[in-house]
């Protein structure tokens, strides 16, 4: 399960390992149905100690205006 910072999905889609939200099996898929909030955030796994091992990634959500801009970005996570 992936936990997205800066987003507001229903609690069952939040990525925290509740008993009601078991891990996604290898090669399986899961659908999420919430409206994304534009901005720059980060995401991480709640599987085992992956978060503590810094298994994280940037989460960049664009709005319609930004998608039309002709920009190139470099993302760096420290």
Image (spheres, rainbow, N blue to C red):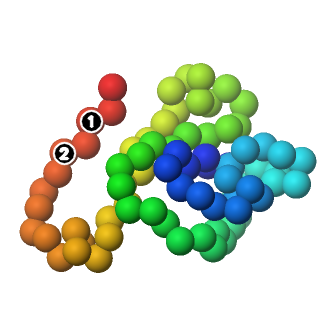
Secondary element at tag 2: loop
CA neighbours of label 2 inside 10 A, class few (<14), some (14 to 19), many (20+): few
Label 1: which residue?
A: 76
Q: Position of residue 15 (x, y in %)?
A: 68, 49
Which residue shows up at 29% across the image and 76% down it?
Answer: 64
Which residue shows up at 52% across the image and 45% down it?
Answer: 5
Which residue shows up at 53% across the image and 55% down it?
Answer: 7
Q: Along the horizontal axis of the image, is 3 left or right of 36?
A: right
Q: CA distance from mark 2 to mark 1?
A: 7 Å
Q: Along the horizontal axis of the image, is 14 left or right of 72?
A: right
Which residue shows up at 25% across the image and 43% down it?
Answer: 75
Q: Along the horizontal axis of the image, is 59 left or right of 32?
A: left
Q: Position of residue 45 (x, y in %)?
A: 61, 40
Q: Is residue 36 visible?
A: yes
Considering every residue shown, the one lying at the far right of the view is: 19
Tags 2 and 1 in contact by the CB under 8 Å rule?
yes
Label 2: which residue?
A: 74
Vertical position of residue 30 compared to residue 56: above or below: below
Considering every residue shown, the one lying at the far top of the view is: 52
Q: Is residue 25 visible?
A: no
The quadrant in which residue 31 appears is: bottom right
- The quadrant of the picture occupied by the C terminus is top left
The quadrant in which residue 21 appears is: bottom right
């Amino acid at each position: 399960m992936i936990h997205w910072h800066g987003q507001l999905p229903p609690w069952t889609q939040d990525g925290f390992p509740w008993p009601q939200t078991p891990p996604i099996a290898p090669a399986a898929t899961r659908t999420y149905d919430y409206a994304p909030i534009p901005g720059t955030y980060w995401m991480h796994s709640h599987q085992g100690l992956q978060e503590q091992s810094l298994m994280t990634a940037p989460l960049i959500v664009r709005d319609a205006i930004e998608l039309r801009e002709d920009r190139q970005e470099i993302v760096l996570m420290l």
